[in-house]
Image (spheres, rainbow, N blue to C red):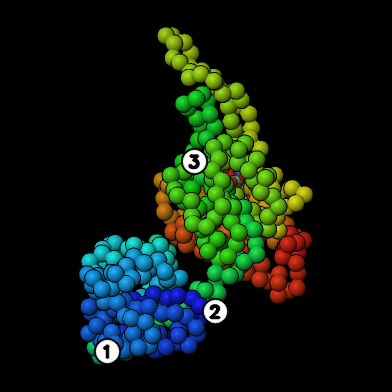
């Protein structure tokens, strides 16, 4: 799993740093290339010499080293890695990372990096339990940093509690599982819709909604990272398209429908977009003007095609069709009715009564509803999570579904035939 992978290991100040030497040994044995950065604190516990000997690579320590900058710019250090592992992560380094500080080589590299991070904290249990540390950890998790441990046990200071760094075996296993996940959706084509649509009234005005596209983009990003071929059809949003997805910007619901049609067939369709239900029947070619004493203009509306419904009932229906439902009140009943009427397999439903809590926010509070045998449903409420975490959970659900079919010897491409409906 780790063969030919490139890992950037950051060793910060903590007695557990000695365990990182064993971790390097395990990575190397598994065929990974390891480059290491040791912070000033880390150097108190392990020497650059021992780290570089095990890595068979120079250990980097200094942000201002002219020699290192010439040979390998500090930005390149993180860019060339497939994954960054911070082990041990001290309380101080965790705080630095959460705040986005860049005052040494390790923090600068991580701030300049777009690579995923596995972080194995190690600190005294009181430091771990401190609300400041807990807040930093939550901040990092919301940003998509994977936290490994810490474990319960006796500490170097003689106290006992939660704060010991996970064993090198565990960190190694988590690293392998990270790379395993990267292949879980290989071979699957996914179409995701995201963002709002704009329905023109005249050349300068439109009808839209508050969708930011954050949830749809996060889903597209993680599925692509897990190896799927992802096509993201997005209404106007201010987010950059995630790396490595094929991106199709659209404006109106009609544009979105046509783009989705053009992309069919697919294995999975996920309708995350807040598609406008109606459009102005005949948008004005010229700007509507106020006139003295004239009544406000009346807008005649036409209904837009329901893209999710269209895909669910298409002849070349994807094996798995997933929708979202934004409801105000009576969530479960409305969501179940919506799942049935749309004909999709799964629905992620959220209550948008207090719109500021969801639209535009980095968090989401969803219920996953699955259509089961005999007109039954299974429902699972997920805690309030960051949109990235919701995306990650959904990726696991999707991968498990396809894996189960594989195990049962059923054809992934005909998942709908064997889905639990
Ligand atoms: N959807 C779609 N095409 C539309 C309208 C909605 O594909 N024209 C999809 C959304 O992407 C989402 C799901 O349908 O996956 C539910 O969207 P939602 O706005 O909650 O519901 P509506 O279908 O618009 O129904 P209503 O507004 O009556 O609740």
Binning the other alpha carbons within 10 Å of mark 1 as few (below 14), some (14 to 19) or many (20 upward) gives few
Check disc 3 and report its element: helix, strand or loop: loop
Binning the other alpha carbons within 10 Å of mark 3 as few (below 14), some (14 to 19) or many (20 upward) gives some
Q: Quadrant of the C terminus?
A: bottom right
- Where, by quadrant of the figure, is residue 22 drawn? bottom left
Taking depth in this image into account, of 245 and 88 the one nearest to the observer is 245
User: Residue 180 has which mark?
Assistant: none
Q: Is residue 206 left or right of residue 264?
A: left
Read off the residue under disc 2: 1
The numbered mark, 2 or 3, whose residue comes first in the sequence reads 2
User: Residue 236 has which mark?
Assistant: 3
Vertical arrangement, residue 197 with respect to residue 228, above or below: above
Check disc 1 and report its element: helix, strand or loop: loop
Check disc 2 and report its element: helix, strand or loop: loop
Measure the alpha-carbon separation of dots 3 and 1. Answer: 54 Å
Mark closer to the observer (1, 2)? 2
- Where, by quadrant of the figure, is residue 79 drawn? bottom left
Binning the other alpha carbons within 10 Å of mark 2 as few (below 14), some (14 to 19) or many (20 upward) gives some
- Where, by quadrant of the figure, is residue 144 drawn? bottom left
Percent across and percent down for residue 23 are 41, 85
Mark closer to the observer (3, 1)? 3
- Mark 1: is the Cβ under 8 angstroms from ligand 1? no
Percent across and percent down for residue 414 are 75, 61
């Amino acid at each position: 799993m780790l063969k030919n992978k490139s890992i950037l290991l950051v060793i910060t100040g903590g007695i557990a740093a000695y365990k990182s030497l064993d971790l390097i040994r395990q990575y190397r044995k598994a065929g990974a290339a390891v480059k290491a950065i040791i912070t000033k604190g880390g150097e108190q516990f392990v020497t650059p010499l021992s780290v570089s000997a095990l890595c068979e690579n120079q250990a980097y320590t200094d942000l201002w080293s002219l020699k290192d900058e010439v040979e390998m710019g500090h930005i390149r250090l993180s860019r060339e890695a497939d994954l960054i592992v911070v082990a041990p992560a001290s309380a101080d380094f965790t705080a630095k990372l959460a705040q986005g500080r860049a005052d040494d080589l390790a923090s600068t590299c991580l701030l300049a990096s777009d690579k995923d991070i596995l972080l194995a904290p190690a600190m005294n249990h009181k430091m771990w339990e401190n609300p400041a540390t807990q807040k930093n950890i939550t901040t990092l998790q919301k940003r998509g940093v994977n936290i490994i441990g810490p474990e319960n046990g006796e500490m170097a200071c003689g106290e006992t509690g939660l704060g010991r760094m996970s064993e090198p075996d565990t960190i190694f296993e988590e690293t392998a599982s990270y790379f395993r996940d990267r292949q879980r959706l290989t071979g699957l084509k996914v179409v995701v819709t995201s963002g709002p649509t704009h329905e023109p009234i005249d050349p300068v005005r439109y009808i839209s909604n508050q969708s930011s596209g954050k949830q749809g983009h996060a889903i597209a990003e993680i599925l692509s990272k897990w190896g799927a071929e992802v096509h993201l059809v997005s209404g106007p949003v201010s987010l950059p398209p995630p790396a490595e997805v094929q991106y199709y910007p659209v404006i109106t619901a009609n544009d979105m429908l046509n783009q989705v049609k053009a992309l069919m067939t697919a294995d999975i369709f996920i309708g995350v977009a807040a598609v406008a239900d109606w459009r102005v029947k005949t948008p004005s070619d010229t700007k509507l003007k106020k006139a003295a004493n004239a009544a406000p203009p009346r807008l005649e509306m036409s209904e837009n095609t329901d893209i999710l419904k269209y895909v669910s009932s298409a002849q070349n229906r994807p094996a798995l069709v997933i929708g979202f439902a934004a409801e105000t009140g009576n969530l479960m009943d409305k969501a179940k009715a919506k799942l049935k009427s749309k004909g999709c397999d799964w629905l992620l439903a959220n209550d948008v009564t207090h719109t500021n809590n969801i639209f535009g926010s980095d968090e989401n509070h969803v219920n996953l509803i699955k259509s089961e045998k005999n007109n039954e449903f299974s429902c699972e409420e997920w805690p309030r999570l960051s949109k990235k975490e919701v995306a990650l959970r959904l990726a696991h659900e999707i991968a498990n579904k396809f894996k189960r079919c594989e195990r049962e010897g059923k054809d992934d491409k005909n998942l709908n035939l064997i889905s639990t409906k």
